[in-house]
Image: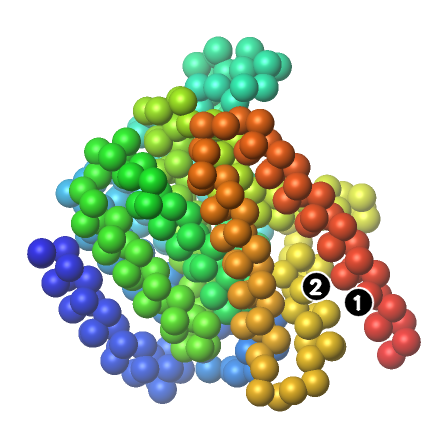
Amino acid sequence: MIFFLFTFFSIFIFYFINNHIRNLKFLPNYKGQKHQKFSGLKNIPLSGGVFFTFTSIILFYSYNYVFSLFLLSIFVIGFISDINFLSSPKLRLLIQSVLIIIFVFLLDIKIHQTKFVLLDNLLENIYFKYFFSAFCLLILINGSNFIDGLNGLMLGYFSSIIFIIFNLDFFNYLEMEKNLIINLIIILIYLFILNINTKLFMGDSGAYVLGLICGYFLIKIYEVNQEISPYFIILLLWYPCFENLFSIVRKFSLKRSPINADNNHFHQLVFFYIKKKIVSKKLNPNNISSYLIILYNLFIFAIGSNDPNNTQLQITLVIFNITIYLLIYFKLFTFKNKIKFHN
C-alpha cells in the first residue's frame, strides 16, 4: 500500500513539476535535434529519465540497495551526457564499461549457458562469465539509447518486457514483491503517455537506467531458472541489442566510426517512409512509426511467451525478427536514398 501511495503521489507531483520545467525551459534537449525534428516542437525537457530514475531507486532500495546505487551511477553518466557535459562518445563508453564491470562483479551477475556449444565452453571460465555479462549489458543499455528516437518507442518496448515478467510470474525468481513490478508498470505507462504526447523525453539517462533494469532482471531470472530458454531472453531483448550490433557493422562497412551518431537507424527509416507516405495532417508519423514497431514486437513476444522453455521456437522467432528487420531496413534505406537523389 505504501508503494502505491508513493507512486501516485510522485506522479501527481511530477505532472506539475514537468509543466513548470517546460515553461522555464529547464533541462532543455541539447542533444535531441533529431527528436525535435520528429516532434516538431522545440521546448521538450529531458525530465523523464530524472523522474524514472529516482522513483526506481526508491522502489528498489528495499529490494537491493546496491542495485539502486548502480542505477544512480548509470543515471549520472546519462544525465551529464544529456546536458552536454560529457560530449565525448569514447569517454562515455569507457566510463560505462568500467561501471558495468564493477556492477556485474558486485551483484554477481553471470550468464551460465547459452546452449551454443562454443560459447558455453568459454563460459566455463568464471572471468569470461563476468566479462560476457558485462558486454551484454553494455550492448543493451546503448541499444536502448539507440531506439529512443521516436516518441514512446523505447518506453513502449521495455514496458512490454516488464509486463511479460509480471504476466509470467517471473518476478518470483527475483524474490521481488509483486507490488514493486506493478508500481514500475504504472510509472512506465505514465511516462509513455507523456512521451507519446511530446511532454518530455527520457534522454540518455532514462534509456541507460531502463535498459539496465530490464537486462539485470532477465539475466537474474534465467540464472535462477535455466529451464527457460536463453533464446527467450534474447527474443525479449533482440531489438535494441541487434540495432546496436547492426549499427556497428553497418558503420564499419562504410568506414565510419561506430560510436558516431547518424540518422540511419531502423526506426528513423520507418519514420522517414511513413512521413513521406502520409498525406493527412491529422496523423502523426512519429507516433504511427512508434506504434507499428511496438505492436510488431508485442505480437512476437506473445508468441514466444506461450512456450518460453521451447528453444527451437525462440530461435525461430529470433531468426525471423532479424530477417524481417534486414529486409525492411534495406528496402527503406533504398527508398530514402532515392528520395534524396531526386530532391
Amino acid, disc 1: Lys
Q: CA distance from mark 1 to mark 2?
A: 7 Å
Judging depth in this view, the residue of 213 and 227 nearest the camera is 227
Q: Residue at x 48, y 19 (%)?
A: 113
Q: Secondary structure at mark 2?
A: helix
Query: Residue 336: which numbered mark, if any?
Result: 1
- Earlier residue among tags 1 and 2: 2
Q: Which residue is mark 2?
A: 269
Q: Residue at x 42, y 52 (%)?
A: 160
Q: Tag count in the figure?
A: 2
Q: Are marks 1 and 2 in contact (CB under 8 Å)?
A: yes
- In this figure, which colouring scheme has been used for the structure? rainbow
Residue 258 visible (yes or no): no
> For the point 19% across and 49% down, which residue is it?
179
SS at badge 1: helix
Q: Residues within 10 Å of mark 2 (few under 14, many from 20)?
A: many
Q: Indicate the position of residue 72 as horizontal and vertical percent values.
A: 31, 49
Residue 92: x and y, percent?
A: 51, 48
In the displayed structure, would residue 278 be above or below residue 307?
below
Query: Going by the image, does 10 lie left or right of 307?
Result: left
Residue at 52% x, 83% y is 41
Q: Quadrant of residue 189?
A: bottom left
